[in-house]
Amino acid sequence: MRNLLNYFEDEDVDDIAGYSIEKWSRYIKIKKSGVVEIYVTDEEIQEAYNACTDDLKSILKLLIYSGNRLSHIHAMLGNFDEKNIVIDNDIAHYPTSSFSSGTKRTFQIFFPASFILELKSISNLKPYESLLKKIKHDRVTAKTIRKWHLNVMIREGVTKSLADFIQGRASATVGSAHYLNKVQQSKKEYRRIMDSFVLEFKVDNSTLS
């Protein structure tokens, strides 16, 4: 059972039979596997960005800004239509519910409005598996970026419910009043904490002379 739960967690599956992985783990007595959870720091994220090749920096930024799964970001970029971007002053979001698959949900991908021009310039999208490998830098991976993003939101006082919605880790009915309310609340909270995700996105030139 431990191996099964570990597999689902590695695959970023959020729930089984309607219950979260955390709840299954809490109620099933499982011997500790000795696996250490990895929580990366702001500095590690910055270092990974600086080390990233120029052609991947924009995708890495989108991971950092949104906290969404790389698979959903890849699907969004592969089917990108700038007409779908919703702009609300200094923030923007892109509807992604159509890219949900099984328990891997996604609703909206949020990012600063200032990122739109850079987002539209992304081209020559690499295969998903290739991106997964190329983005990895030491402890920083697409998965640990997602955990970092969640921790930043919780640290900044975002409720677990809204944090889950922003990252696509909640159940909601597309088109319902509840869903629309979640979008509005998420925009308000994202605007409040957005600067926490805007690191120093520049190449470290300290070694250049």
Image (cartoon, rainbow, N blue to C red):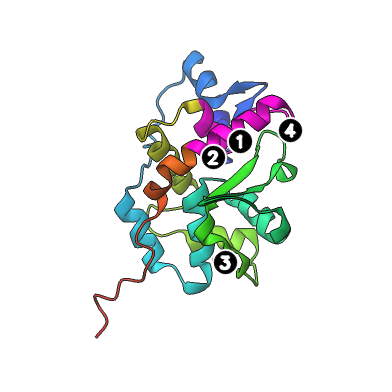
Q: Residues within 10 Å of mark 1 (few under 14, many from 20)?
A: some
Residue 15 against residue 133 in the figure, above or below: above
Q: Residue at x 72, y 46 (%)?
A: 99
Q: Residues within 10 Å of mark 3 (few under 14, many from 20)?
A: few
- Image x and y of residue 208, in percent: 27, 82
Q: CA distance from mark 4 to mark 3?
A: 28 Å
Numbered badge on residue 117: 3
Q: Earlier in the sequence, mark 1 or mark 4?
A: 4
Foreground residue among 125 and 154: 154
Q: CA distance from mark 4 to mark 2?
A: 17 Å
Q: Which residues are magenta?
A: 161-188
Marks 4/3 in contact by CB < 8 Å: the verdict is no
Magenta stretch: includes residue 163: yes
Q: As shown in the figure, which amino acid type bears the numbered disc 2?
A: Lys
Secondary structure category for the residue under label 4: loop
Numbered badge on residue 187: 2
Q: CA distance from mark 1 to mark 3?
A: 23 Å
Marks 4/2 in contact by CB < 8 Å: the verdict is no
Q: Residue at x 68, y 21 (%)?
A: 17
Q: As shown in the figure, which amino acid type bears the numbered disc 1?
A: Val
Q: Which residue is mark 4?
A: 174
- Image x and y of residue 37, in percent: 38, 37
Secondary structure category for the residue under label 1: helix
Numbered badge on residue 183: 1
Residue 61 against residue 86 in the figure, above or below: below
Secondary structure category for the residue under label 3: helix
Residue 153 appears in the picture as rendered: yes
Marks 2/1 in contact by CB < 8 Å: the verdict is yes
Q: As shown in the figure, which amino acid type bears the numbered disc 3?
A: Leu
